[in-house]
Each structure stands twice: as C-alpha cells, then as structure tokens.
Image (cartoon, rainbow, N blue to C red):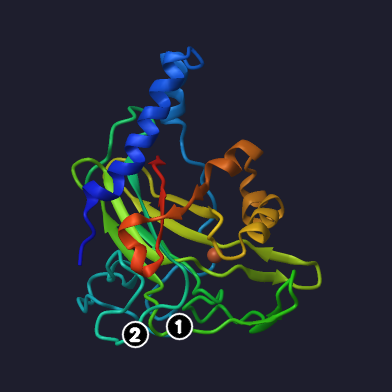
C-alpha cells in the first residue's frame, strides 16, 4: 500500500524550513549561501559489485514479470516484503523520503527513476558475486554474525519521483559487513542508489546511517572515515557528512517501531 507522500515529507520539511528561516533571520546565512547550500550537489560514489542484473541474483525477485524490464527496475519501493511471500524482512524498518533536485536550478526533477539496493539485515547481498566470509565475529562484542539470505527481503526496488520531485522508500537497515577481516576493514551499513533522470547523466551514490536506534550506530560512525568506498570516492569530511542520513522514530510507524529519515538528492 502506498505511503502518504504528504505526511512523510511535511514533518521534516516544516522542521527544516523553520530552521532555515531562523538562520536567515539571525543573519547567519545570506541568500547567496542559502542557495549554495540548497544546490550543493550530492557527492557521487561507486556502483559496487552487487548491482542487481538479470542472472546475477541468487534469488530472482521480480514482482513485475515483464521480461523487457530489467530486474533492477521490476520491484516496488517497499523492500520490507516480497509480493506473494508470506513473511517480513528481518531488521529495523526505516522510511527514507525526500526530493530529487537539479543542481543547476535547485528545481525538483519529476519523473526520475531511483533504483535502491542493499544487503540484508545480516549483511548479505542477493548476488552470486557475494561469496565473502559467511560468518564473522562482531568487532566489538565478538558475537558471531551469520551473513544469511533473507527470502522475505526484497533486496532492490524502484521509485519514480512525482511532480514535486518527491520519492520514498521503505526498507530495513542493512548489516555492516567485512571487507578484509585481517585488516579489520568493514563496510558500514549503507544503501546504494542509481538515479536515472530525463535530462542529467546517470547518477550513482551511497547513503549511510546515523541515529540512536540504528543497529550498531556507534560502530557505523567509527567505520565511516576509513570506509573503502568513501576513501575511493575521495570524499572530504564535509562531503562524508553530506551522505549520512539521520533517522528518528516515525510516529506513523509506531507499531512497527519504524524510523524515518529525509534526504534530497541534488544531481
Ligand atoms: Fe554495498
């Protein structure tokens, strides 16, 4: 069932606009710097090896059976269950919403396709190439984590922006996972995005998590500055901050203990 757009964005939009008005009134921001703040392009980061392509998946999840649609675009924007399967994805539920904006004009871009994909709550991708360490000790607690396939997790989904350039996704917080256990390298929890907009080149990035109720929040923050993807993309500390989304309890998702986050892609 579609989530109400208006409700999802209004609360955060109001908070944000109130904050900005306050800053302008207090003289901390000129209109020029405000425009620059609003239009600062979202930092780009690599696609990674696990983008969903036909025949690469372990478990072909295709809610739309039309073979002319690539599998990456065959599923909807709620990744917390798979149509026709009776179960719910493991993990902390989140709703992410926001707008896609044009970096040159700050205007919303309607009719833009966002493809989002991620690992399961235990940190495993639905991709044949994800053959890394199946079990590993949690770097802080030592508790063994089993990276397992979750048949009720949708793994990837597609959203298309409306006339106001707005999008939303419902999903779970993916697990962090090891890159090189000996070197103590792990990828923090992250969501992947590929954005296909009518008038701009293909845009690819990743978003990270922050929030008291985000699983492994402290560890996730500690992993960010040494993350291989962030380092590879050459993100400055400021740019790193720009791709972290803060999540807080969502009053409309109380029963599911859902968290809500807001992010505008400026492309
Ligand atoms: Fe990844």
Q: Toward the viewer: 73 or 14? A: 14
Residue 113 visible in this rendered orientation of the protein: no
Image location (x, y in percent) of residue 128: 51, 82
Mark 2 residue element: loop
Name the residue: 21% across, 79% down. Answer: 65
Quadrant location of residue 101? top left
Whether residue 55 sits left or right of residue 132 in the image: it is left
Image location (x, y in percent) of residue 56: 44, 79
Whether residue 254 sits left or right of residue 26 in the image: it is left
Mark 1 residue element: loop
Q: Quadrant of ligand 1?
A: bottom right
Name the residue: 34% across, 30% down. Answer: 106
Q: What mark, if any, has residue 9 been given in the picture?
A: none
Name the residue: 54% across, 53% down. Answer: 211
- The answer to whether residue 127 is above or below residue 101 is below
Residue designated by label 2: 87
- The answer to whether residue 200 is above or below residue 227 is above
Give the farthest residue toward the right.
182
Quadrant location of residue 115? bottom left
Q: Toward the viewer: 70 or 94? A: 94
Name the residue: 41% across, 45% down. Answer: 263
Residue 183 visible in this rendered orientation of the protein: yes
- The answer to whether residue 101 is above or below residue 113 is above
Q: Toward the viewer: 168 or 232? A: 168
Image location (x, y in percent) of residue 52: 42, 71
Residue designated by label 1: 150
Disc 1 versus disc 2: distance between alpha carbons? 10 Å
Foreground tag (1 vs 2): 2
Q: Earlier in the sequence, mark 1 or mark 2?
A: 2
Which quadrant holds the N terminus? bottom left
């Amino acid at each position: 069932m579609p989530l109400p757009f208006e409700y999802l964005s209004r609360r955060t939009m109001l908070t944000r606009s109130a904050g900005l008005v306050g800053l302008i009134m207090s003289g901390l921001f000129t209109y020029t710097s405000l425009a620059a703040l609003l239009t600062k392009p979202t930092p780009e980061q690599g696609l990674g090896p696990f983008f969903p392509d036909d025949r690469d998946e372990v478990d072909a999840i295709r809610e739309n059976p039309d073979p002319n649609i690539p599998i990456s675009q065959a599923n909807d924007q709620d990744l917390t269950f798979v149509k026709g399967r009776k179960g719910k994805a493991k993990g902390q539920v989140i709703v992410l919403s926001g707008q896609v904006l044009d970096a040159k004009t700050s205007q919303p871009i309607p009719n833009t396709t966002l493809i989002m994909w991620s690992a399961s709550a235990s940190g495993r991708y639905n991709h044949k190439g994800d053959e890394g360490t199946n079990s590993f000790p949690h770097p802080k607690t030592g508790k063994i984590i089993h990276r397992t396939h979750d048949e009720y997790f949708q793994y990837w989904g597609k959203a298309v922006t409306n006339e106001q350039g707005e999008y939303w996704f419902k999903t779970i917080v993916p697990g962090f996972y090891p890159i090189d256990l000996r070197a103590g390298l792990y990828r923090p929890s992250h969501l992947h995005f590929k954005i296909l907009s009518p008038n701009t080149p293909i845009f690819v990035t990743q978003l990270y998590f922050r929030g008291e109720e985000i699983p492994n929040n402290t560890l996730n923050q500690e992993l960010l500055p040494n993350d291989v993807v962030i380092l590879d993309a050459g993100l400055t500390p400021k740019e790193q901050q720009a791709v972290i989304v803060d999540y807080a309890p969502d009053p409309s998702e109380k029963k599911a203990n859902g968290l809500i986050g807001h992010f505008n892609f400026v492309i």
